[in-house]
Amino acid sequence: MLKFKLLSSFFLLLILQIGYSQNPTSKKSIDSLFFALKVKPNSTDKVDNLISLYKKSVKSRLIDEAIIDEAILVSEKIFYLKGLGESYDRKGLTSRKNYNYSGSVNYHKRALNYLKKTTDSILIIKCLNNLGVTHRKLNLEKEAFDYYFQALDLSEIINHNRSITIALNGIGNVFVDTKEYDKALHYFKRVYALDLKSENIRGQEYSLSNIGEAYLYMKSFDSADHYLNKALALTKEYNHKSSEAIRYNLLGLLYQKKGEYNKSTNYYKEAIPLFTKSNSVRYLSNTLINIGENQLNLGKYDEAYENINVGLKSAKAIKSKENISLGYNALVNYFTLTKNYKEALNSHIIAKSIYDSIVNESTQRSIVSTQIAYETAQKDKKIQQLANEKEVSLSLANTSFNRLIVISAIGVFVILILSYLLYLYRRNSDLELENKNSELQNYVHQIKELKDKVNSKDLLKNQVLSESFNDFGLSKREIEVFKHLSSGFSNEEIAEKMFVSKNTIKTHIKNIYSKLDVKNRIQAMKKVNSNS
């Protein structure tokens, strides 16, 4: 018994010192890396490296907010929206770890505003899930549901199993908070099926534990015992110490609900050194208060009072209102059992005021969360606008440059094609001109030859005709009329051509027919041609 009291006192001292003990070598290493990054030129890689270093400082419990603030500063200067979103999301996680839930909401919402301007779906989903967790801590179930379901929808669209399980677990936990345990079981079992399919051992442990916890609150103790022990066996098999402590804590609660207080206390005691090692103050305070409750039921009032007070002090140190309320309700039971009714009443008043403040705070923060969204959007509007303008400018510049290269290439190509076509055109034109000149010369030569032939033929014909006409005794005037007759002209046309009357022409024709001894012009032409 003395040993346990000493352990409780040691635990209280540990609580007060948590966060102050640091490894000088690790701190020096982180500071050195931070300085090396700080002096580098601003770039997206610099921001990403600062965020990675901040994660490292958080993991080693040497949190340096200057690192993430530098990442934000650089991101703002270069309008790096992804860097801003991831940095603010990290600040939100740190705020939640420090129990500053309203600050956490603020940072996560700022992060979401930036991340929604990017195409990084995974970071958006993480931020939505983080907002779900923080709103759940604030007892804002409606808002928590909203963010978890947004995360679930987006996770299913991109088929990202890890994000799907986180969202489903979050939804299940909110249903636990609202005491809708059958709905919680539905989501926890969905997660367990996914964990089995993907062979995710840690996920299976967590899912089995969640299912067991839901059955516990439903007072289905046998089912709760089955799933919690199954989770514990898996945890021990793979030596997951941090998870093992939570399993012990839940088994302690299970046997407390069943009225098996000694067995409950034994499980709680198994969890204490593991929670102490991992600095899980919230779980430690809860465990000690519950041990005090068990001891009250076993009539060990002094020990109970000691453990309740240690747990209550640690809850106050981290401002965990749920555990503070739990501690004061335990004191109500203690003072009632020890017949100190005045103190019991005082503890009851404090416990009720704490509970009322949680309820009122939930209502107020529901309003505040809406205000934060608006104020954050206003604060970040200029940065987002500048970032968008920068992206548009870069895009236009790249597009213009690419367009210029393409146009230049097309221009050169077109000029070459036109030059070649012009060369071919000129060459063809020259060839065509030469061909036409040659053809023209040939035509001229042929025409000349034809003219010469015609002239020669006409001359010969005229000579022959003249000889033929002389044979028939035709006068010069009659020969002229005969030629017109041979050309097919009518009497009237011949008269017009020869500027004489029609009767004169008839007389000449009559004389021609008489001398040639023919009756018509056809016979006349045959007679003359046959004679020639």
Image (cartoon, rainbow, N blue to C red):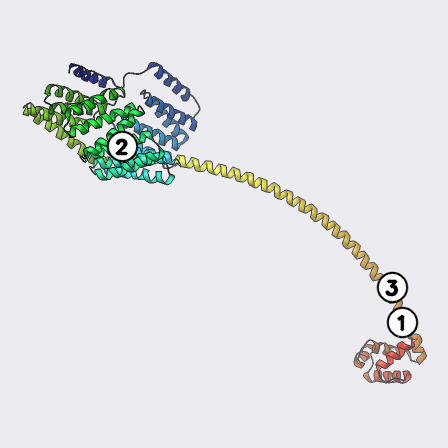
The disc placed on residue 373 is none
Residue 490 drawn at (x, y percent): 79, 80
Question: Image height check: is 352 above or below 407?
Answer: above
Give the quadrant of the N terminus.
top left
| Label 1: few (<14), some (14–19) or many (≥20) C-alpha neighbours in 10 Å | some
Along the line of sight, which residue is nearer the eye, 80 or 491? 80
**Picture quarter containing residue 158?**
top left
Task: Report which residue position mark 3 lands on.
Answer: 452
First-in-chain label (3 vs 1): 3
Q: Can residue 477 be seen in this view?
A: no
Q: Which of marks 1 and 2 is nearer the N terminus?
A: 2
Q: Mark 2 points at which residue?
A: 208
Q: Position of residue 79 (x, y in %)?
A: 40, 32
The type of residue carrying mark 1 is Lys
User: Which residue sits at x=36%, y=30%?
Assistant: 86
Q: Position of residue 243 (x, y in %)?
A: 28, 26
Q: Is residue 187 left or right of residue 428?
A: left
Q: 117 left or right of 490?
A: left
Of the numbered discs 2 and 3, the one sitting upstream in the chain is 2
Describe the element under mark 3 as helix, strand or loop. Answer: helix
**Real-space CA distance between mark 1 and mark 2, rounded to the nearest whole angstrom:** 130 Å
Residue 187 appears in the picture as rendered = yes
Q: Nearer the viewer, residue 191 or 350?
A: 191
For the residues labelled 1 and 2, say whether their Cβ atoms are less than 8 Å apart.
Answer: no
Q: How far apart are marks 2 and 3 (CA)?
A: 122 Å
Name the image quarter holding residue 80: top left
Could you tell me the amino acid type at mark 3? Answer: Asp
Q: Is mark 2 on a helix, strand or loop?
A: helix
Residue labelled with disc 1 = 461
